[in-house]
Amino acid sequence: MSDIAIHWFRQDLRLSDNPAFIKACESGAVLPIYILDDDTAGKAKMGGASRWWLYHSLKSLNDSLKGHLRLYKGKAADILPNLQNIYGAKTITWTRCYEPWRRQRDEALKEQLKQKGVTVISQNGSLLWEPWQVLKADNTPYKVFTPFYRKGCLQSAPAPAEPVAPPADMVFAKALQEEAIELEQLDLLPKPPIPDWHLSLEPHWSIGESAAQKRARDFFETGLQGYKMGRDFPALSHISKLSAHLHFGEISPNQLWYWAKEAAQIMQDKGQTIDADIDHFCSEIAWREFSYSLLFYHPDLPDTPLQKSFEAFPWQQNDVALLAWQMGQTGIPIVDAAMRQLWQTGFMHNRLRMVAASFLIKNLRIDWRIGEAWFWDCLVDADLAANSASWQWVAGCGADAAPYFRVFNPVLQGEKFDKDGTFTRQFVPELAKLPNKYLFKPWEAPSAIIQDCGIQLGKTYPLPIVDLKRSRQQALEAYEICKSTAFAQSEHK
Ligand SMILES: Cc1cc2nc3c(=O)[nH]c(=O)nc-3n(C[C@H](O)[C@H](O)[C@H](O)COP(=O)(O)OP(=O)(O)OC[C@H]3O[C@@H](n4cnc5c(N)ncnc54)[C@H](O)[C@@H]3O)c2cc1C
């Protein structure tokens, strides 16, 4: 009987460009497993939309593995050593994860298994560069994106590893009678009495490795040209929508990195230059890397402002306003369109994530961590590193953050980035007939126009829950208080 190698799938739900899985296949008959470890995740346990995605992704991975994926639920720290024992596995492989709770767990497990004489192989398969490969000359991590990317990644770090093909040969270990469970038993989908909210997500996504590759190919063929400009306009298809595929590891950033360069070559052969678009796309992938570096070096990133002065910020508790924001009923059309896109599709366009987050933090002055938690539950691409780094960025308390005093004006944002209202009308159909001039500020429309369009402000569509100008001013004043409180506290130290 050949040796048995366990490959523990986590955020690498694919067979191609998966160096750790290849190592397992080379080491013997492979036992592919997935463990849903909510117990160890604690507060970072996956939200509802992510769980829905995971359900379909595991289904797809199991098909690629010809039905050999074994599923477990519980503490990985108990389950993995137990499986190693039952199967007598000599090798265990996994792709590295970077969330603090996973790192802590994996380090302890590695030590424990190694002491038992097991060969444990952990490899990079989720990032272009490991966080420790991108450091400043003095070996400290970068806090500003542009030097992180231009100097740290592009000039100093080694080139990202070229993607590798899926294993040519997969021999699977014979499953024993241990307690693996069925996909349904992972309880990833909502069950009655919880409503079938996930059904509205289904038409928007194809999930799994081949779907991810198809989406990438389609994007490179039709969306990449014009990406730099077009990525800011939610009604256009110049974004890849690959974030959830990347998060679950159905596709690797290395594949995207090199395929983007190949796409550039193909365009060049056709006499078209898309260098600026490629450069911009690669730099967005690098924002993901930057977020991971921030999380790696600041494990409290999800909960604690990087700029400590923000600890003193006078946040407001306003449950009514929070609910209006969550439900897309704020009376500010672009914010409502964004929040409804999130609820209905599990995704929100990047520009709108910034606008909706700024509205919550600055106009409503609700703590960024509350918005972060809502996104965590609703986004199919919810990612601890990207979500917390981005919320801190919008709040102005993160690394290389937009300054707090830069408050997005949601009316101007709508007028600029959804000029003809296509996106807003799709998600806020009750305003569909309103002329563009008033679409983003219906409260300014003459009552005759409002009536002609079949709208009753305050009834069929809400009046704004805050005055944008006054709330902006109040936010700036609160910021001044927070700055001076922090200054006074530092003086007393
Ligand atoms: C408040 C807020 C919360 C966010 N939460 C998340 C999150 O939970 N998960 C997540 O993946 N992204 C998050 N982002 C970043 C960004 O909005 C999404 O990555 C992007 O919208 C995904 O769409 P796309 O795949 O079409 O992106 P594209 O424009 O096609 O970009 C390609 C890839 O680059 C990465 N990327 C792009 N922009 C960023 C960014 N600003 N930060 C980090 N990575 C980026 C993503 O992996 C993305 O798939 C958040 C942004 C904000 C402002």
Image (cartoon, rainbow, N blue to C red):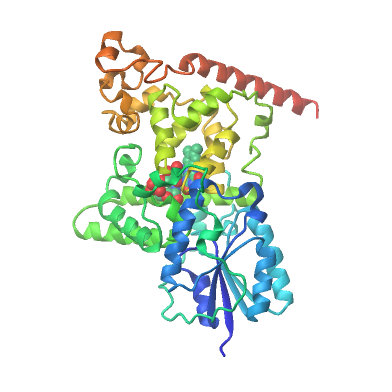
The residue drawn where x is 51% and y is 40% is: 375
- Where residue 21 appears, x then y in whole percent? 51, 72
| Whether residue 481 is situated above or below residue 237 in the rendered picture | above
| Whether residue 110 is situated above or below residue 293 in the rendered picture | below
The residue drawn where x is 54% and y is 81% is: 173
Seen from this angle, which residue lies furthest front? 193
* In the image: residue 222, left or right of residue 442: left
The number of numbered discs placed on residues in the rendered structure image is: 0
* In the image: residue 331, left or right of residue 423: right
Which quarter shows the N terminus? bottom right
Seen from this angle, which residue lies furthest top? 447
* In the image: residue 269, left or right of residue 7: left
Tell me where residue 210 sits by quadrant: bottom left
Pick the residue in front: 82 or 368: 82
The residue drawn where x is 44% and y is 52% is: 244
Seen from this angle, which residue lies furthest bottom? 1
Seen from this angle, which residue lies furthest left? 270
Whether residue 154 can be seen here: no
- Where residue 394 appears, x then y in whole percent? 52, 34
- Where residue 425 appears, x then y in whole percent? 30, 29
The residue drawn where x is 77% and y is 26% is: 491
Tell me where residue 413 sits by quadrant: top left
| Whether residue 420 is situated above or below residue 243 in the rendered picture | above
Pick the residue in front: 84 or 68: 68
| Whether residue 50 is situated above or below residue 109 in the rendered picture | above
Whether residue 217 can be seen here: yes
Pick the residue in front: 426 or 312: 426
Task: Tell me the quadrant of ligand 1.
Answer: top left
- Where residue 232 appears, x then y in whole percent? 35, 37
Which quarter shows the C terminus? top right
